Image (cartoon, rainbow, N blue to C red):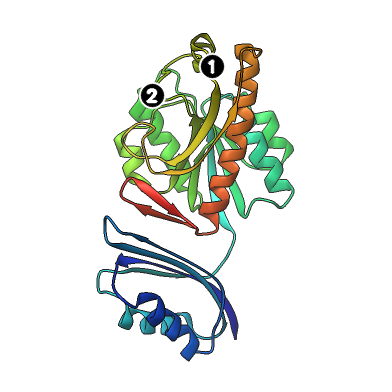
Amino acid sequence: MEKRVRVLIDCNDAKGLVYKISKVFYDRDLNIENNREFVDKEQGKFFMRTVVSGNFEVKELENELTKIIPIDANLRVVEPKRKKIVILVTKESHALGDILIRHEAGELDADIEAVIANHDTLEHLVRRFDIPFFKVSAEGMTREEHENQVMMLIDEQKFDYIVLAKYMRILTFKFVEAYPQKIINIHHSFLPAFIGANPYKQAHKRGVKIIGATAHYVTDDLDEGPIIAQDVIPVNHRLEWKDMQKAGRDVEKIVLSRALNYVLNDRVFVHGNKTIVF
């Protein structure tokens, strides 16, 4: 039966890897539709993402590749399919709204299983798109108690990734540890220069000339996980801080969408505290 898969390999670099891997595809009469590779020369690491199609069995292809790649290699043969996401939000609507619209338009290669919030501010927005909405208020709870309830809801869903669409709560180590390389966050790119409340007002007072956004995997180091996507736009003295905030939110939407596209299409390799994005 005709199949189309993404072959993802990362390992210690070695001479002839591209040739050996490509030969396996050739010998099996597979068509290479797309291929990208990269070598981190400092670390001696090799990364390769290849899309192949043809008549084959996935397990047999995995076995053939395992024989010719280094023993330390991480190998995944992924059949393209729509992934599933759970979204966490607080009160800001711009990032969530953009995801919902892209999902409705068929531009998001994923199904939204649920939206979970610590306020009900965005419930009316989510309900318009016929997506389950759950409110878990943090009022009167410790952070751990609140997270336990959120995690129970998350674990009831079938999901591949958790998206923090301006979820304004700091996650505990327990939460992050439960979903390694599964949580994606978006925030403005003023960190660590402008920390705390109203960073756009702080940036305006400082006279910054560019504003931007960063999407990254969440780790226990606050806002310092491997970066998936970033972008910036120029600003000038004519903008008030509220104008800068509006422009910054637009950048956040674009960067989060771009990061999700990379992740949902298996284009991201995590390499230490950075990423290789094909």
Q: Which residue is mark 1?
A: 200
In the rendered image, the residue lying farthest to the top is 205
The one of 235 and 32 positioned closer to us in this rendering: 235
Q: Are marks 1 and 2 in contact (CB under 8 Å)?
A: no
Sequence order check, earlier mark of 1 and 2 = 2
The quarter holding residue 129 reads top right
Q: Secondary structure at mark 2?
A: loop
Q: What residue would you read off at disc 2?
A: 192
10 Å neighbourhood of mark 1: few (<14), some, or many (≥20)?
many
Three-letter residue code for mark 1? Tyr
Comparing 60 with 67, the one in front is 67
Using the rendered view, name the quadrant where residue 81 is placed.
bottom right
**Mark 2 Cα shell of 10 Å, populated few (<14), some (14-19), many (≥20):** few
Q: Position of residue 236 (x, y in %)?
A: 61, 17
Secondary structure under tag 1 reads helix
Q: Position of residue 97 (x, y in %)?
A: 67, 35
Name which residue lies at 32% across and 82% down.
68
Image position of 173 with respect to 191: above or below: below
Q: Residue at x 25, y 69 (%)?
A: 72
Name the residue nearer the viewer: 169 or 136. 169
Measured along the vertical axis of the image, is residue 68 above or below residue 159?
below
Callout 2 amino acid: Pro
Q: Is residue 168 above or below residue 73?
A: above
